[in-house]
Structures are given as structure tokens and as C-alpha cells.
Amino acid sequence: MVRDLNMDSTDNPKQDRSFHPAVRFFGHFVSVLFHPLFITSYAIAFLIFVHPFAFEGLDPRLKLFRFLTVFLSTSFLPLLAVFLIWRLGLFVRSFRLRTARERFIPYAIAMTLYWWPWNVYRNLADIPIAADRLLFGSFLSVCGGWMCNIFYKISIHAIAMGAISMFFLLFSFSDNYASGLYLSVVLLLTGAVCTARFIVSDHSSFEIYSGLAVGMFMQWIAWQLAPYLIN
């Protein structure tokens, strides 16, 4: 049954989670550093600046331009949009989007902004298919989160980490320069972020675990469909 989206907080009863201040600091630090709006930018930065072959042959200035295109659309502009509608008192009461109802408009804005870089990248000849799959998966993950948000306040952090974990898992099986180190680091970060959300948020276990599942599933769908959608 659909929950009342006017309910406060996470639409769940408050859970008693008492942690040492140092542990809570860790939770807040990790939650901010790996905010969902930063994950796609981190991943594309890895492909452009760290991976030795993904964007091989591109001029350094063009690499930076490609990164900034993604960063602006998937990180800066969504954050700016949420900040503006919060300061103007439109639709949201808290910059942290504490309720499911407050997340509908930001989700809609994010879907538009996440669609744009994927639509641009898929029409460029110098973009590796891995980057196209990453951006398409990020867009589908936002769409999946928006649909789940109709019924409950799913963890956006978990969606983002689930999507990036699945991307690196699939990428490690298709990349000629595959390294278990990259996948191990991402899985470790996924565990840290989800643990942080248990510590400092009032998400239920279901909201976090389902977020992981939705993100992984959407990225898997993107991996399967992206090659057929490239112009």
C-alpha cells in the first residue's frame, strides 16, 4: 500500500540508533564525500584520468572538457537546483530532502540533467562504450529511484553505490586492462557508504538494501541496452 507522503521524516517510525560521536562523524563524512550526486563524476573521472586506455588519444584539454560536461550535469546543476528551490521555499522544506514528498521535484530535475550528458556522449565518436553505459545506467538509476519514491523513501546513496558497484563488476569482465583492485575499492566504499547511512540516517534496512538492488539492476539494464542506443 502506498504510504502517506505527507508524513514526516522517512515515513517510518524513528529508530533508536545510538553511536559514539566519532562514529557519527565518520557516518556524516562518508555520506557527504560519497553523496549520490558525486558518484557519476567520480566514475567518469576514473575512466578519463586514471584508466590508461578508456579515453586514450584525447587531448588533455578535451579530456577535462568531457569531465566538466558530466560534472556540471550530474553534480553541480542538480545541487544548485535543489538549493534554489529550497531557498525559494518551493516544494521542499529541508535541503537534505528528508521526506519522500520533497524528493519528487528534485528527482524530476535530476532525471532531465542526467539524461543530457548521456544523450550527448552517445553521439560522439571518441566516447568509449563503457562511459556511455555508465551515464545511461546513472540516468536509469535516477528513474528507478523516482519510481520507488512513489511508494517509500528509498536510499539514494544506496542506489548510487549499487549502480557503481555493478558498473565496475561488469566493466572488470569486459575490460582488457581489468584490475581487481578497482572493483575491490568500489565494493569497500559501497559497504562504507551503506554502513554510514545506517549510522546517521533513519533509513530502514529495507530502504537501503532495496536501494542497492535497484541501482545494480538499473546499471545491468543499461549495460545490456546501451550498445543498441548508440547513434
Image (spheres, rainbow, N blue to C red):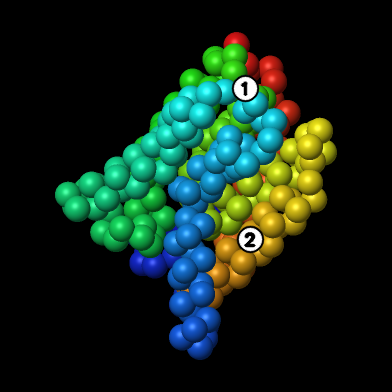
In percent of width and height, residue 75 lies at 41, 43
Mark 2 or mark 1, which is nearer to you? Answer: 1
In percent of width and height, residue 135 lies at 56, 33
Callout 1 environment at 10 Å: few (<14), some (14 to 19), or many (20+)? few
Relative horizontal placement of residue 136, taking residue 89 as reference (left or right): right
Image quadrant in which the C terminus is located: top right
Relative horizontal placement of residue 44, taking residue 129 as reference (left or right): left
Front residue of 9/140: it is 140
Residue lying farthest to the top in this orientation: 231
Residue at the (36%, 57%) spot, across then down: 97
Q: Secondary structure at mark 2?
A: helix
Residue lying farthest to the left in this orientation: 88
Callout 2 environment at 10 Å: few (<14), some (14 to 19), or many (20+)? some
Q: Which mark is residue 113?
A: none
Q: Which mark is residue 57?
A: 1
The reply to whether residue 148 is visible in this rendering is no
Q: Which tag, 2 or 1, sits closer to the chain's start?
A: 1
Image quadrant in which the N terminus is located: bottom right
Residue at the (62%, 22%) spot, across then down: 57
Front residue of 111/149: it is 111
- The quadrant in which residue 187 appears is bottom right
Residue 3 drawn above or below residue 130: below
Residue at the (80%, 50%) spot, across then down: 180
Front residue of 95/177: it is 177
Residue 190 drawn above or below residue 223: below
State the residue position of label 2: 189
The kind of residue tagged 1 is Gly
Front residue of 102/171: it is 171
Q: Are marks 2 and 1 in contact (CB under 8 Å)?
A: no
